[in-house]
Amino acid sequence: MKYECDVIEDLLPLYKDKACSAASSKAVEEHLAECPKCAQMLNALKDTVIDEMIVRERDEVIDSQSRFFKRRSAVIGSVLAAIFALPILICMIVDLASGNGLGWFFIVLAAMFIPTSLFVVPLMAPKNKMFLTMCSFTASVIVLLAVCCIYTRGSWFFIAASSVLFGLSVCFVPFIVCRRPVNAYLKNFKGLAAMTMITATFFLMMICIGIHVASRNYFILAFGISVPLVLLTWIIFLIIRYMPANGFVKAGTCIGVISIASFIADVITTQILINNGVTVYSDYSYVGAIIGVAVGVILIAIGLVVKKGNKEND
Ligand SMILES: [Zn+2]
């Protein structure tokens, strides 16, 4: 052999692309005829080229498809936006023509934000479609409430808006925390963040109602009832999410906690009723509590046995 394999190996990529001189080409060909190792290397080089071509072709197909779908959703989105704009335009013309100023116009304008947020936003948002749709829907409902409240000169906006915010956060927050872009920031704290958000909107709603009702009894009663319930919900959540145990133990603990909590709540409400002169007939709530705690203990016992069994199998 005239040349070392190392030299030929360096030349192979150039040879494959037909980019080396005639003399080099000849030297490579002579070497390849005698050296199966370098011939194999050339074949491998050609194979990777084919693989790369397939990948590039695949990417081009996906690209053109997604461009097609993006174009199509943009067209559908524009058509829908135009349809939603129609009543706004008609209302503006009628409102102005009737000489009443732009009263109804703003209500219709705000009302049209709702279908827009539900249909146009997901079609036309370039990314984070679900997140943007949920946020814009919530915002558009609140804007509509604000406009209606101003139009009717009402004072109910904060009650309505905070209630809507609480209701929608119960529905949307569990989804929002699991999806882009929020999930990237929350990582392992999705459940905690969702619970905090729902608790915050709940108390915001309670405070807004309280301010509107303007009664001292309201705060004592409303928070007296809701704080223990919210606490119980948090305890259940923390048990399910963070207790280092299997499903049986968690379920048993939850059932036990709920049984004890409802027993305590029953005792307190019975006492309040008696204090207010209501006759309370024989109360058997302790039976339910005992059954609940017993079921909890049995489940925990099963859980511990299962855990022990798994350990022995290991
Ligand atoms: Zn060689």
Image: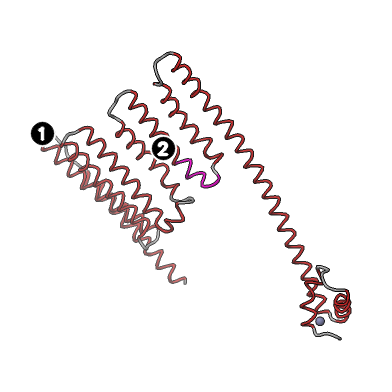
Q: Which mark is residue 139?
A: 2
Within 10 Å of the Cα at label 1, are there few (<14), some (14-19), or many (20+) other Cα atoms? few
In the figure, is residue 92 to the left or right of 126? left
Q: Which kind of residue does numbered mark 1 sit on?
A: Gly
SS state under label 2: helix
Using the image as rendered, state which of residue 302 and residue 51 is in the foreground: 51
User: What amino acid is labelled 2 in the image?
Assistant: Ala
Q: Secondary structure at mark 1?
A: loop
First along the sequence among labels 2 and 1: 2
Segment tinted magenta in the rendering: 126-134
- Of all residues, the one furthest to the top in this rendering is 98
Q: Position of residue 189 (x, y in %)?
A: 39, 57
Does residue 167 belong to the magenta stretch?
A: no
User: Residue 94, position in %: x, y?
Assistant: 47, 16
Q: Residue at x 37, y 55 (%)?
A: 240
| Horizontal side, residue 300 vs residue 125: left or right | left
Label placed on residue 277: 1
- Main secondary structure found in the magenta portion: helix
Q: Residue sitting at 54 percent across and 47 percent down?
A: 127
Q: What is the CA distance from the residue labelled 2 to the residue labelled 1?
A: 47 Å
